[in-house]
Image: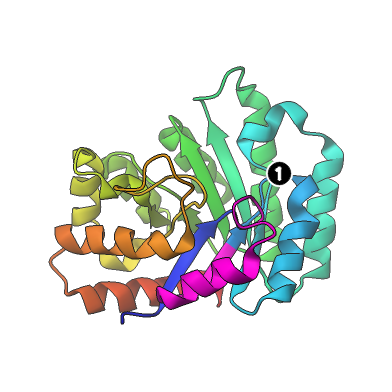
């Protein structure tokens, strides 16, 4: 069986995993998943995400304030994030999920941009990579990243933009997250883009329990289904499946130090 997958983006502190962690991890391990990065999205979830990373060897943590939480954001949430970064636990490997979103109602975009910049500055100060969310904001996000110029860069997760936009992130030193969207044959633009990017710039992710893969619509996504993402990527790439797996695993280890 193929092993060595790293799920670089999973909300493991949400149902259906919450309260079923051991069985869920066993399912992932049986499918060849070696590591999972559990991604926090609000200050109220920081402690729970870190507890998961401390409890399970295969889980690492990322903490951040998601742009979709902008309406509930308070300055004290940034203070809580900074407090965790000051402790610098070994299993905390990134700041995320952070970013920009113009898809939501009442995006309060200037406030989003200020929150993003504040978290990017923390990433620069603590020399951690970032896990980035972007919907309808790729060009604006790239501008922020170029301006702040992080030492450890990061990944634009669940990428579904154009080849030109992907190249702009790559030129700034960022990785591109490959998720469930590209398992759908109708996602021709995304598949065509991911076929043309350097393999050295790609990471695999599930965004579980979100972003379901082809064939599992209507069900919570799960880390073990990263195999489906990999298989779909193999369909459109010229490299061998083993080379794709090994290169992307090495990319994940290099970025996150895991």
Instruction: Inspect the magenta stretch and tell me whether residue 14 lies in it.
Output: yes
114 left or right of 80 in image: left
Asked if 207 appears above or below 139 in the picture, the reply is below
Rendered residue at 79%/46% (across/down):
44
Residue 4 pos. (x, y %): 40, 79
Q: Is residue 155 left or right of residue 65?
A: left
Q: Residue furthest top?
A: 106
In the depicted view, which residue is nearer to us: 50 or 194? 50
Check disc 1 and report its element: helix, strand or loop.
helix
> Coloring scheme of the render?
rainbow
Q: Residue 73: horizontal and vertical position, in percent?
A: 77, 33
Residue 111 vertical placement versus 94 (above, below): above
* Residue 159 in picture, x, y percent from top left: 38, 46
- On screen, 74 above or below 195? above
Q: Residue at x 74, y 74 (%)?
A: 54
Q: Quadrant of the C terminus?
A: bottom right
Q: 256 or 32: nearer the eye? A: 32
Residue 69 appears in the picture as rendered: yes
Q: State the image coordinates of residue 87 (x, y, percent, origin top left).
A: 83, 69
Q: Is residue 165 left or right of residue 154?
A: left
> What's the magenta region?
13-37
Q: How many marks?
A: 1
Q: Is residue 150 visible?
A: no
In the rendered image, which quarter contains the N terminus? bottom left
> Can residue 42 be found in the magenta stretch?
no
Looking at the image, is 59 positioned above or below residue 63? Answer: below
The residue depicted at 82 percent of the width and 34 percent of the height is 74
Residue identified by numbered label 1: 118
Badge 1 crowding class, 10 Å Cα cut-off, few under 14, some 14 to 19, many 20 or more, is few
Q: Nearer the viewer, residue 18 or 190?
A: 18
Q: Residue at x 32, y 79 (%)?
A: 246
Q: Quadrant of residue 130?
A: bottom right
């Amino acid at each position: 069986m193929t092993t060595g997958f790293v799920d670089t983006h999973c909300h493991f502190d949400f149902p259906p995993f919450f309260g079923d962690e051991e069985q869920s991890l066993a399912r992932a391990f049986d499918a060849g998943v070696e590591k999972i990065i559990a991604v926090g999205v609000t200050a109220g979830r920081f402690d729970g995400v870190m507890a998961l990373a401390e409890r399970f060897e295969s889980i690492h943590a990322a903490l951040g304030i998601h742009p979709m939480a902008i309406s509930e954001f308070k300055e004290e949430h940034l203070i809580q994030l900074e407090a965790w970064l000051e402790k610098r636990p070994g299993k905390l490997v990134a700041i995320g999920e952070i970013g920009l979103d113009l898809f939501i109602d009442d995006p309060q975009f200037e406030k989003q941009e200020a929150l993003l910049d504040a978290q990017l500055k923390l990433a620069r100060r603590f020399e951690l990579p970032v896990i980035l969310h972007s919907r309808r904001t790729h060009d604006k996000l790239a501008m922020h990243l170029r301006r702040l110029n992080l030492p450890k860069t990061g990944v634009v997760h669940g990428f579904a933009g154009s080849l030109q936009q992907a190249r702009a992130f790559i030129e700034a030193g960022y990785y591109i997250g490959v998720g469930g969207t590209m398992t759908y044959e109708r996602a021709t633009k995304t598949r065509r883009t991911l076929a043309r990017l350097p393999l050295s710039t790609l990471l695999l992710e599930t965004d579980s329990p979100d972003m379901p893969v082809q064939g599992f619509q209507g069900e919570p996504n799960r880390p073990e289904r990263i195999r489906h993402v990999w298989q779909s990527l193999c369909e459109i790439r010229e490299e061998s499946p083993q080379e794709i797996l090994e290169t992307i695993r090495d990319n994940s280890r290099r970025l996150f130090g895991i």
